[in-house]
Amino acid sequence: MKNSIKLIVLDVDGVLTDGKLYIGSDRVEYKPFHTQDGMGISLAHYAGIKTAIITGRNSEAVSKRAEELKIQYVYQGIHDKLSVLEEIMSELNITMEDVCYMGDDINDLPIMQKVGFPVAPDNAVTLVKSSAQHHTKARGGEGAVREMIDYILSSQHDYSALIRDYLDGKITITQ
């Protein structure tokens, strides 16, 4: 990680979730999200880091979770993730070097090959892991996003001060 990260962009299936699709007989899609990832996203926001979701699938569960976590940019049903990222970067006036992207499969490679800090969860396919600068010990949906965020925050901020602010009631956290 060369520069400070200003934007964290996440895929959903296999990153924020375990990658399994749960579709009920009512055709409603269910997704399990990890509360530790939510805590990490809240800490990133407090530290001034913006967050985005860019995913190839559409899911009401993703919309609900993103709203709970106050994720600023949420794009679903996207096949050209790179062009969406470029739009976000233009709005934020940042460069690729300022972006961290976490993905787990080959549809994430176009972004991962361009951003300043590409990260893969432990369950990512081999090709994606080899394209990442960092990969987590945790699997997607099992705290991988939190592990990545802790790594970034520890590198860029006084992490213990962030925790003190939480303990002192200065941060409202959504898990």
Image (spheres, grey):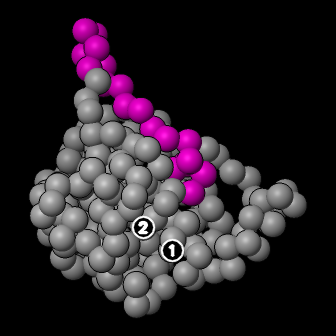
Q: Residue at x 41, y 32 (%)?
A: 32
Where, quadrant-wise, is the C terminus in this rendering? top right
Which structural element holds mark 1? helix
Compared with residue 113, is residue 172 higher up or lower down, i.e. above or below? above
Q: Residue furthest bottom?
A: 2
Q: Residue furthest right?
A: 168
- Residue 35 in magenta stretch: yes
Compared with residue 174, is residue 9 higher up or lower down, i.e. above or below? below
Q: Amino acid at mark 1?
A: Ile
Compared with residue 116, is residue 29 higher up or lower down, i.e. above or below? above
Q: CA distance from mark 1 to mark 2?
A: 10 Å
Q: Residue at x 67, y 73 (%)?
A: 159
Residue range corresponding to the magenta coloring? 23-40
Question: Looking at the rendered structure, which numbered label has been put on residue 112?
Answer: none
Considering only order in the chain, which callout, 2 or 1, is on the residue closer to the N terminus?
Answer: 2
Could you say which quadrant of the image residue 27 lies in?
top left
> How many other residues sit within 10 Å of disc 2, few (<14), some (14-19) or many (≥20)?
many
Q: Number of marks in the image?
A: 2
Q: Amino acid at mark 2?
A: Ile
The x and y percentages for residue 39 are 60, 51
The x and y percentages for residue 152 are 51, 74
- Residue 135 in magenta stretch: no
The x and y percentages for residue 141 are 40, 43
Question: Looking at the rendered structure, which numbered label has been put on residue 8?
Answer: 2
Q: Residue at x 51, y 71 (%)?
A: 151
**Would residue 128 appear left or right of 31 to someone viewing this image?**
left
Q: Are marks 1 and 2 in contact (CB under 8 Å)?
A: yes
Q: Which residue is mark 1?
A: 152
Camera-side residue of 79 and 139: 139
Could you say which quadrant of the image residue 77 lies in?
top left
**Would residue 69 appear left or right of 61 to someone viewing this image?**
right
